[in-house]
Amino acid sequence: MSDEPTRAHLQIGQVAERTELSIKTIRHYDEVGLVTPSARSAGGFRLYTEADIERLLVIRRMKPLGFTLEQMRELLDALEVLDDASSDPDERTRASAVVLECRTTATESCEKLRRQLDYAEEFTTLLGARVTVTTRD
């Protein structure tokens, strides 16, 4: 393969732009085995496909909800099983259970974040009222 990526592959900088993740974060996910680049250029540069980007986007969505790296790995593996029509039925059942568990956890995390956002907005309003009072004096 040449140093120029093919149209199907993106270099890490392009992936960082598309996913809004830092290059350092993408490299970390490679090092821990969450998203391994699909190819390498002749010069050794990581090359990513659209499927790799989709995996990174799943991780990016999970991160603020407090999922661990192991939970991320488990969900990504489950999604692969469900996307593979030839997967064993028992494997598909286990994968579905993982997805359901992650969905439940994500829903609970979203509710917690909404409460935290409500508190933050209340606080901002309180501070805004104090600034208004202070500037009138």
Image (tube, helix red, strand yellow):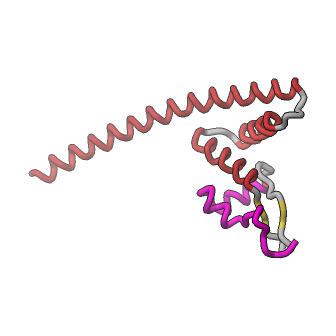
Residue 127: x percent and y percent? 27, 45
For the point 61% across and 39% down, the residue is: 66
Residue 68 in the image: x percent, y percent? Answer: 69, 40
Quick check: is 65 in the magenta stretch?
no
Residue 50 position in % (x across, y down): 73, 54
Look at the image and tell me in which quarter the N terminus lies: bottom right
Above/below status of 113 relative to 101: below
Extent of the magenta region:
1-30
Q: With 108 as the anchor, is 77 left or right in this view?
A: right
**Residue at 72% across, 37% down:** 71
What is the x, y in percent for residue 126?
A: 26, 40
Q: Is residue 100 above or below residue 24?
A: above
User: Magenta span has 9?
Assistant: yes
Q: Residue at x 80, y 39 (%)?
A: 80
**From the viewer's perspective, is residue 26 above or below residue 87?**
below
Q: Hey, which residue is sitting farthest left in the picture?
A: 137
- Answer with left or right where residue 27 lies relative to residue 3: left
x 67%, y 61%: residue = 15
